[in-house]
Every structure is written in structure tokens, then in C-alpha cells.
Amino acid sequence: MKVAVLYDGGWDTWDAKDVASVWQSVKEVQLALKARDWDTTLVPVRAPNDFSWLSKVRRSDAVFNLCEGIGGHSKFEDFVVATLELTGVPYTGCRPWAVSVAHRKHAANTLLARSGVPIPAFVVTDGNKLPADLTLPVIVKPAAEDASVGIDSGSVCTSKKALKKRLAEMVEQYDEVIIQEYVAGREFNVGFVGDQVLPIAELCFDNMPEGSWPILTYAAKWDVGSPEDLGSVPVCPVDLPAEQQKRLVAVARHAWQSLCGGAGYGRVDLRMDATGQPYVLEVNPNPDISDCAGLSRMARAHGWDYNELVGRIVDEALGRSSSREAAAVLTGTTADQA
């Protein structure tokens, strides 16, 4: 089988660290695919108006989609996934609807809440008016970014004065900002590959710098060796009573099905308050699957090594495509119409 590995080819403004981050994941996936004796082609996407990659995709039997944007701009991820959908070639990861909605936190939260998923109360604002009905403390973050972009030690506000100051800073950088009630408690991740749930992981913040809030900031996620990175330690499998694990998984699965339809692979981030009530913070389609990242860690706890995880993700994409073709035969439509 021929598999095209699609990825962000980067721009001239990228530094060596940016290039290395993307390239490491690409090479890890390529090696895992080769372990199944599949032929691989590395296919970069270099600019929004450059579609030279399409011809290589259409000559492939499947696409492993690692493209999280173009030139580091995550908004272009939506368009890449939508273009893949139009090719008819099986591709890994979530469908265009899920990826697009997840990039708009306020839209995703609204849809999840309407589906009955427990979500911390929130508002979206351009900074001109403070919310009157949210309970402090609150966390302030960009409404249309991911990967903890825009989140730092000052993101949690405990007073209206602090909130007003934080909003003024944020609206200078982002068009829309989301303000959400802060849920005190333990933080968990639940991973999915298709309908398969992976073991729960917990983010332990016991060693965060003094005075820091126990949240996953941009530095904690991407600045390796920083105090926030060292202070936020993932643990998988989690040490949690079976009944609480069952409740977490049920809420996470509800969110995963509601937003992503149980297709592709992803991660649901949750907090559990003092009463044991889980709240969904975010649904993350197509999260980082580097061998050192969270989904891979969960897969290992499930008994899958990295090669198995990558293979399962491809199998899910092929199975999804086969289901569409089978539906087309039964309904008398084309596969693209099914």
C-alpha cells in the first residue's frame, strides 16, 4: 500500500526548532508505516495557494495527515482537511466539520452544551464588555487557537480588575477571546482512536512554580525543561477509583461522539471538581501523536507500541472509507455521495 504523509512544509520565517518539531513527528510516523511494509511518500504543504501536493495525494492509497496548518497558522488546517475530503482518498484523523468547529472554542462549547455535555460556563467577547454572570475565578484564552497558545500564568483571573487587564492584553493579539469559569480540581485526558477508548491520563501539577495556577500553559506544553514543563507531569494509567474512571470515560465519550462522531483520533480534556463531577474543557481532534506525546502514552498503557498506534489510526481511516463505499453500494449512490 502507498501512504502519503502530509505535513506543514513551513515558511522561511521558521527557526530550526520549528522545523525539528514537525520533522520529528513526520519521521516517526514514516518509520512506523514502513514497519508494516507500506511504501511512503513525504508530502509537504508549503503555501495556501499551492496545490502541487494534491497530485501526490491522489496517486496514494491512503494519506496520513499530519498537517496542522500551513506555515504554522492553524486556521489553514481546516482547509487542508476539507480538500482531503474532496479527493476521495482515505485519510487519517477527524473529518472537516470536527476540525473546523474545534478551532472555534465558543462554537464547540455551545454544541457540546446543547448535546448535554457538562461544560464550564463561558462567554466570548471582543473585550468591550465584562461578563456580569460568570463566577470568579475565570480563565481567559483565545477563542480560535489550540495547543495552549495564549495561555500563561496570568490567564486565570480572580478579580474584575485582573480580568479587565487581562482582556485588554488579549484583544490586542486576538480578535475574539473566551472567558470561562475556572474549575478547581484534577485534570484528565481521555484518548480515542475511532470508537476505541484509551486509558485515562492525569496531569499532575504538584511541582508547579510557587504562585502558579495548576493549568497547562504554552510553556508547560512546548518549552521543554521550563519550570512549568517540569511542574506539569502526565501520569498514565491514572490512579482513580473505578467508578470515577467510568464517569470520566462516559462524559468524554459523549463529547467525542457529539463533536467528532467517533471518527478519527483525538483527545478529550476534562476537569473533575470536588464533588466528582467531570467538566469537558476541550475536544482535540488530531492531537500530537509524537512518540513522546499524550496519545502515544495512553496507547502504550493500552498495550500498543508506537507502530501499533500508527497502524490502528490508518486502519480506522481505511475502515471509515470502506464503510462509505459499502453504503454507496447499498443506496445506489457514488462513494462521494454516501
Image (cartoon, rainbow, N blue to C red):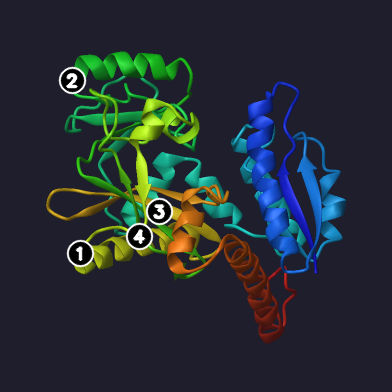
Write the residue at 72% across / 55% down: 30
Give me the C-alpha separation between circle 2 and circle 4.
36 Å
Q: Which residue is mark 4?
A: 237
Give me the C-alpha separation between circle 1 and circle 4.
12 Å
Q: Would residue 197 be seen by someone viewing this image from the given angle?
A: no
Image x and y of residue 263, in percent? 54, 65
> Left or right: 212 with respect to 70?
left
Report the mark closest to the observer, 1 or 2. Answer: 1
Query: Upstream in the sequence, badge 1 or badge 2?
Result: 2
Report the mark closest to the observer, 3 or 4. Answer: 4
Specify the amino acid type for callout 2.
Ser
Residue lying farthest to the left in this orientation:
275
Query: Upstream in the sequence, badge 3 or badge 4?
Result: 4
Asked if residue 67 is positioned above or below residue 156 in the image, the reply reads: below
Give me the C-alpha separation between circle 2 and circle 3.
29 Å
Query: Upstream in the sequence, badge 2 or badge 4?
Result: 2
Q: Which residue is mark 1?
A: 241
> Left or right: 1 with respect to 256?
right
Query: Upstream in the sequence, badge 2 or badge 3?
Result: 2
Give me the C-alpha separation between circle 3 and circle 4.
15 Å
Specify the amino acid type for callout 1.
Pro
In the rendered image, which quarter contains the C terminus? bottom right
Q: Which of the 4 image quarters holds residue 156?
A: top left
Q: Which residue is mark 3?
A: 268
Write the residue at 35% across / 60% down: 237
Give me the C-alpha separation between circle 3 and circle 1.
19 Å
Q: Which residue is mark 2?
A: 159
Give me the C-alpha separation between circle 1 and circle 2.
35 Å
Q: In what element is the residue under mark 4?
A: loop
How many residues crowd around disc 2 within 10 Å: few (fewer than 14), some, or many (20 or more)? Answer: few
Image x and y of residue 82, in percent? 67, 51
Q: In what element is the residue under mark 1?
A: loop
